[in-house]
Every structure is written in structure tokens, then in C-alpha cells.
Image (cartoon, coloured by chain):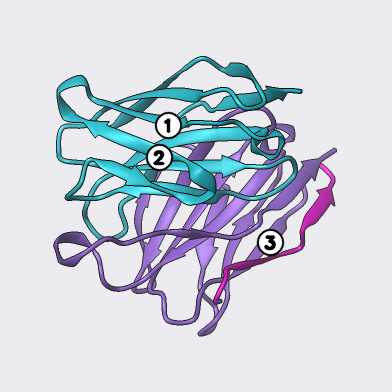
Chain colours: A purple, B cyan
Amino acid sequence: EPEVTQTPSHQVTQMGQEVILRCVPISNHLYFYWYRQILGQKVEFLVSFYNNEISEKSEIFDDQFSVERPDGSNFTLKIRSTKLEDSAMYFCASSAQAGGSLGFNEQFFGPGTRLTVL
Amino acid sequence: AQSVTQLGSHVSVSEGALVLLRCNYSSSVPPYLFWYVQYPNQGLQLLLKYTTGATLVKGINGFEAEFKKSETSFHLTKPSAHMSDAAEYFCAVSGRSSASKIIFGSGTRLSIRP
């Protein structure tokens, strides 16, 4: 069964460093998302991406964050200068073309990357 | 705007007892509703979803939920709890357009007593 994969599973970095979190969405999906979950808290939406553009972003997704689909398979989240409060589990998700009024558009989640900022 | 409220951050039941996890939603448009489960140190697994049609939806592992529009509720139930059900459960809502973000509740930790 196709699945979303994420690498690395755990990333440790120093405050102020840049990190890139990588995701490989399900191959025929067209919509991509990043969510994060700070330890012990709820899952929060960061950004959605379609047709090489950001569709929507939350207030969390400030200028320190960026997303990219550098090739036909990867979807990345970059944090330019990490802060302590960026420590969280980051989940990637993808969904298929069929959706909206034409049908349900389920998002499939990856296993997450745990980011620890020291 | 959409939001989800889960009543009870921690629920503890005995093995074999009824599980009831409460969720109320707010949405200005007909929503999609979901329950996700998260086991320790793992990702999110979709338990069940309501999109349209029958208001009682059945999911994996014997869970079900009923969409009650008049009460804006989507409570999760399971007739008989099993030790393996111990996990964090998130109720969630999204819009119906393509690329709609999912809004999650704060979660309910379910503990099962032997």
C-alpha cells in the first residue's frame, strides 16, 4: 500500500541552524501539507501546497519557514534559523486530485520527523 | 472558521467497558469530520471519517462515531475497551474543498485499566 515517508526520523540541531525536513508523498498525489505537534500538544496546520505554490499557510508559518518541491517526488520544509520553540514533531501529508465537490479528499500522513533544537 | 473541542484531556476506563470520547465541532459550512489515533512515538492513523450520507460511521478496531448536526457533535465510541486501545485520540474537522487544512482538537488520552 502506498505511504508517505519522511526523513530523517529524528533531527537534532543547534539553535540558529538551518534544517531541511524531507517528505516523499504518495506518488499520484497533488496536494501536500505540513503539520507540527509540539510535545504534549495538539497537531497544528502549517502550510498546504499545490501546483508549486502555497495554497494556505498558518500564522505559525512565518518568514523562517519555506517549502519546496524540488523534483517530482520530494516535498521539503526548511527552517532557516531554528529556535528552541521549533522543537516538535513535524508531519507531512498528501492527498489526491479527486476531492472537493467531486468526492472526499483524504490526507495521508507520514510517520513524522522529531526535531530537537538545542 | 472551524474549530474542534474535545471534552476531557484524559479518559480512563476498565478493560471491557464502554469507551466514549466526546467531540464538538464548529463550522460555518458542512464539514468533514475525523477521528485519528496516535500511539506513543508514532504518527497519526485515521480511525474513521464522516463525509456524507449515513451519520453513523464505523472505523477500524471496532470504533464508531455518530455525526449529530443538531448537537454539533461527533463522539467516538467502542462497546468494549481493549488494552491495546490505550493511545491519544484526536477529533478533527476540515472543509470540503480540495487542499482543505485539517483542524485538530487538543486530544484525549485514553487509558485502559486491567
Whether residue A55 is visible here, answered yes or no, is yes
x, y percentage for residue A54?
37, 60
x, y percentage for residue A17?
77, 50
x, y percentage for residue B31?
23, 41
Instruction: Judge whether B56 appears above or below A111 on screen.
Output: above
Label 1 vs 2, first from the N-terminus: 2
Identify which residue, A79 or B105, lies in the foreground.
Answer: B105
x, y percentage for residue B25?
30, 27
Identify which residue, A54 or B40, lies in the foreground.
Answer: B40
Task: Residue at 74% x, 33% y: name it.
Answer: A84
Residue bounds of the magenta highlight: A2-15
How far apart marks 2 and 3 lie (CA) works out to: 38 Å
> Residue B112 occupies which quadrant of the picture?
top right
Q: Tell if the residue under mark 3 belongs to the same chain as the one under mark 1.
A: no
Task: Residue at 75% x, 44% y: name it.
Answer: B41
Dot 1 amino acid type? Leu
Instruction: Judge whether B8 appears above or below A84 on screen.
Output: above
Dot 2 amino acid type? Glu
CB atoms of marks 3 and 1 within 8 Å? no
CB atoms of marks 1 and 2 within 8 Å? yes
How far apart marks 1 and 2 lie (CA) works out to: 6 Å
Label 1: chain?
A: B
Identify which residue, A42 or B25, lies in the foreground.
Answer: B25
Q: Identify the residue position indicated by label 3 in the image.
A: A20
Q: Identify the residue position indicated by label 2 in the image.
A: B64
How far apart marks 3 and 1 lie (CA) works out to: 37 Å
Label 2: chain?
A: B
Spot the residue most to the bottom. Answer: A72
